Image: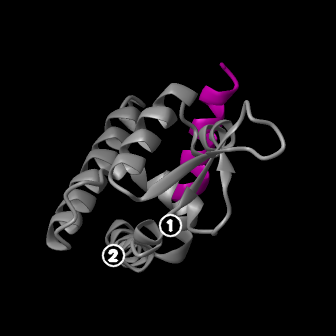
Amino acid sequence: MKKQRLIALSSRLAEKANQFIIAEFKKQELFDIAPSHGDILSLLFDGNAHEMSEIAKKIHRTKPTVTVLVEKLEKNGYVQRIKSESDARFTMVLLTQKGFKLQPMFEMISEKLNALAYFGLRDEEAMLLEILLEKAIVNFEKQE
C-alpha cells in the first residue's frame, strides 16, 4: 500500500471539523467567533489570566497569530488584556463575563464534535488512531 494520504486525510478531517463548528456557532447565533478562537477560549475557561506567549505555546500558534486572535476576542468583548503586575513588558489575557458565558456552549459543541469524530470506532481503534496521529505530529516536531 502506498503511504501518501495521511496529510490529505488529516487536512480533510480538520476542514470537516471546522465546518461542523461553524455550523454549530450559526445555530447558536454566534457570528463573531471563529473555530480558531476555540483553543484560546478553552484555555482561558480555567479562570486564570494567561500571558500571551504562554497561550501561543500551549495552543501551538505563533505569538503574532495569538495577538491577532486575542485582539478580535477583545474587540468583541470576550477577553480583556492587562499588563502583568510583576512585569509590565508582559500582557496577560483573561476572560470577561461575556467570555465565560460561552463555556457551556463550547462544551456542548465539543461533545457533539467528538461524538461525530469517534462514531463507529471501537475504543481500541480510537486509541490507536490517536497514538498514530501523535506519532506523526512528533515526527514533524523533531524537524523544528
- Which residue is pictured at 44% across the width and 66% down the height? 99
Q: Nearer the viewer, mark 2 or mark 1?
A: 2
Residue 124, image x, y percentages: 56, 71
Residue 101, image x, y percentages: 41, 76
Residues rendered magenta in the picture: 129-144
- Which residue is pictured at 54% across the width and 34% down the height? 61
Q: Please tell me whether residue 120 is drawn above or below residue 55 in the rendered image.
A: below
Kind of residue at disc 2: Lys
- Image side of residue 125 versus residue 138, left or right: left
**Disc number at residue 112?**
2
- Which residue is pictured at 57% across the width and 45% down the height? 59
The alpha-carbon separation of the residues under discs 2 and 1 comes to 19 Å
Does the magenta segment cover residue 79?
no
Q: Quadrant of the C terminus?
A: top right
- Image side of residue 24 versus residue 37, left or right: left
Tag 1, which secondary structure?
Answer: helix
How is the model colour-coded?
Answer: one colour
Tag 2, which secondary structure?
Answer: helix
Q: Please tell me whether residue 30 is drawn above or below residue 134 in the rendered image.
A: below
Q: Please tell me whether residue 133 is drawn above or below residue 121 in the rendered image.
A: above
Instruction: Assess disc 1: are there few (<14), some (14-19) or many (≥20) residues with their C-alpha within 10 Å of its C-alpha.
Output: few
Q: Quadrant of the N terminus?
A: top left
Does the magenta segment cover residue 133?
yes
For the residue pair 38 and 70, the one nearer the viewer reads as 70
Tally of numbered discs: 2
